[in-house]
């Protein structure tokens, strides 16, 4: 067993949104609000609701994640920006209710340690940014769609924040903010976020899907499980400090984290 000492410096914590920061899928909440706001027809709402339900039950995999980019861009294509932004009055409070108490404590602990905190999600930036601000986080990193005359065109206007696109987005941020990614933290439940988790110095698998759990175990990453109705963090790793440190708030500089190799 070897020890790794956390160093201080320009660092941040990056949180995936669905099934990590919040329980379930934000797409379902967004879909209901869009349907009620008459931004999407009923047949599209039913289709998207089924996809969100499948994701909430099983998480993302190569099958359920297929076409994620096209679905997200297609969902806003032709929609006025003001109409989508107006949905936040309904969406943000509902998502706040889904925020895991353990994740909220982690945000607070990182903030107390002087780190910036970000949501990183494939969801539209117009949803991610207000939620991040409502949680007292530094900012949100989400998918940006091209806008012409106040209307979404259905084309990208920056990295698609999914898979490798999340890495591109946080690398751009790191360059602007002077962050050192090897001193940064990353949290996710999904193997689709392996590129992001591998890009930071301190990856943590939260309620991981099977593929991510295998990878995390093989590479000695902390693996934790947040209970839906409890503030307890269940230790699922062989780390001597690992998940206990997460629950206790040991994020200050100089904390030693034991890993099994």
Image (spheres, grey):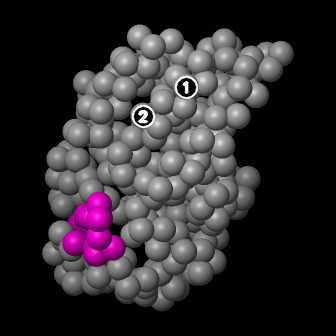
Q: Which residue is mark 1?
A: 36
Q: Secondary structure at mark 2?
A: helix
Does residue 165 appear anywhere in the picture?
no
Which of the two marks, 1 or 2, is nearer to us in this view?
Answer: 1
95 with respect to 258 (left or right): right
When asked about the image quadrant of residue 33, the answer is top right
Q: Position of residue 31 (x, y in %)?
A: 48, 28
Question: Residue 98 — which label?
Answer: none
Q: Mark 1 or mark 2: which comes first in sequence?
A: 2
Which residue is at a point 36% across and 77% down the rendered structure image? 246
The magenta segment is: 219-234
User: Left or right: where does residue 133 sit relative to residue 31?
Assistant: right
Residue identified by numbered label 2: 28
Q: Residue furthest front?
A: 36
In the picture, the quarter occupied by the N terminus is bottom left
Horizontal side, residue 10 vs residue 232: left or right:
right
Residue 241 position (above or below residue 166): below
Instruction: Please state which of residues 190 and 129 is positioned toward the viewer in this rendering.
Output: 129
Residue 13 in the image, given as x and y percentages of width and height: 53, 63
Q: Is residue 250 visible?
A: yes
State how far apart marks 1 and 2 are (Cα): 12 Å
> Tag 1's secondary structure?
helix
Outermost residue, right side: 149
């Amino acid at each position: 067993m070897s020890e790794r000492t956390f160093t201080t410096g320009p660092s941040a914590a990056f949180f995936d949104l669905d099934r990590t920061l919040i329980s379930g899928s934000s797409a379902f909440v967004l879909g209901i609000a869009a349907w009620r706001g008459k931004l999407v027809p009923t047949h599209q709402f039913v289709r998207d609701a089924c996809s969100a339900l499948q994701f909430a039950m099983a998480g993302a995999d190569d099958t359920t994640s297929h076409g994620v980019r096209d679905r997200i861009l297609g969902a806003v294509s032709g929609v006025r920006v003001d109409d989508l932004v107006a949905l936040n009055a309904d969406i943000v409070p509902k998502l706040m209710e889904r925020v895991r108490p353990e994740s909220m404590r982690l945000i607070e602990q990182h903030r107390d340690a002087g780190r910036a905190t970000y949501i990183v999600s494939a969801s539209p930036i117009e949803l991610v940014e207000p939620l991040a601000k409502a949680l007292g986080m530094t900012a949100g990193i989400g998918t940006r769609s091209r806008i012409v005359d106040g209307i979404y065109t259905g084309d990208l206007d920056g990295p698609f924040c999914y898979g490798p696109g999340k890495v591109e987005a946080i690398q751009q941020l790191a360059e602007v903010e002077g962050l050192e990614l090897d001193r940064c933290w990353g949290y996710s439940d999904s193997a689709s976020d392996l590129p992001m988790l591998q890009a930071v110095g301190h990856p943590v698998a939260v309620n991981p899907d099977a593929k991510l759990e295998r990878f995390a175990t093989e590479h000695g990453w902390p693996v934790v499980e947040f209970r839906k109705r409890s503030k307890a963090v269940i230790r699922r790793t062989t780390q001597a400090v690992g998940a206990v440190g997460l629950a206790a708030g040991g994020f200050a500089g100089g904390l030693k984290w034991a890993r099994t190799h």
